[in-house]
Image: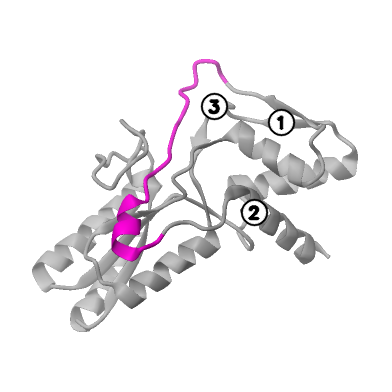
Amino acid sequence: NVLGTINVLEYVKKNPNIHLIFTSSAYVYGEPSFVPITENHPTNPKHPYGLSKLTAERYIEIYHAIFGINYTIFRLFNVYGPGQSMGYVIPDFIHRAAQLKRTGSKEFIIKSSPKVVRDFVYVEDVINAFIRAVEQGPFNTVINICSGIPTTIENLAKLILKTMNLAEMKIKFKYKETEKVSVLYGSYNKALRLLNWKPIINLEEGIKRTISSISVYQK
């Protein structure tokens, strides 16, 4: 993330008419001190991925200050939708539920606290934010792209199981009682103000579309 961004910045520096749109991450914030998270929340990443994104952001800001490049930084929250690879919570849950359905299992195990909270934003809404930035930018600032709606992992699992006609499946959580509950959701007020953007696809509809796309792909 860091070296790749520097390479891009060196190119943009020589082509000043370019508007650089950078995809950063909500994980630059670290464990939030308040929610919903706004763009002025302190940045304190806890993992290498978040650190790499924050470092890239700083390089962009410095190149703007020194060389005058134009940019917009989007801090994306939990993006999901058709085409997302395994390793992310929603496709993982969908595939696991489908496997359990085929085997006739009645227990859906989740290895985290049911109270973990995330902010899920549908990929089509994210694309619309990029389009608006291209048409209206540059803004030379950071902007959250999120749903603004907190969703617990338990409610996410229930919604996926219900949509897949597996509402009777029992959800079981395996986690340490001392594990810190992570709550991460944002505010899109700045995106609304600058881009006139807000999310359109709610989680229920987004889950339906995602499950449908996976079913079509598997056929």
Q: Which residue is mark 3?
A: 115
**Quadrant assignment, res 65:** bottom left
Magenta stretch holds residue 194: yes
Helix, strand or loop at mark 3: loop
Left or right: residue 142 compared with residue 172 = left
Q: Are marks 1 and 3 in contact (CB under 8 Å)?
A: no
Q: Which residues are magenta?
A: 176-197
Q: Residues within 10 Å of mark 3 (few under 14, many from 20)?
A: some
C-alpha separation, residue under disc 1 versus residue under disc 3: 15 Å
Residue depicted at x 19% and y 81%: 16
On screen, residue 130 above or below 90: below
Q: Are marks 1 and 2 in contact (CB under 8 Å)?
A: no
Q: Which mark is residue 109?
A: 1
Q: Percent from the top left, x then y, of residue 64?
A: 16, 67
Most foreground residue, 190 or 39: 190
Q: Which residue is mark 2?
A: 205
C-alpha separation, residue under disc 1 versus residue under disc 2: 24 Å
**Quadrant assignment, res 158:** top right
Mark 1 vs 3, N-terminal side: 1
C-alpha separation, residue under disc 3 versus residue under disc 2: 22 Å
Of tags 1 and 3, the one toward the viewer is 3
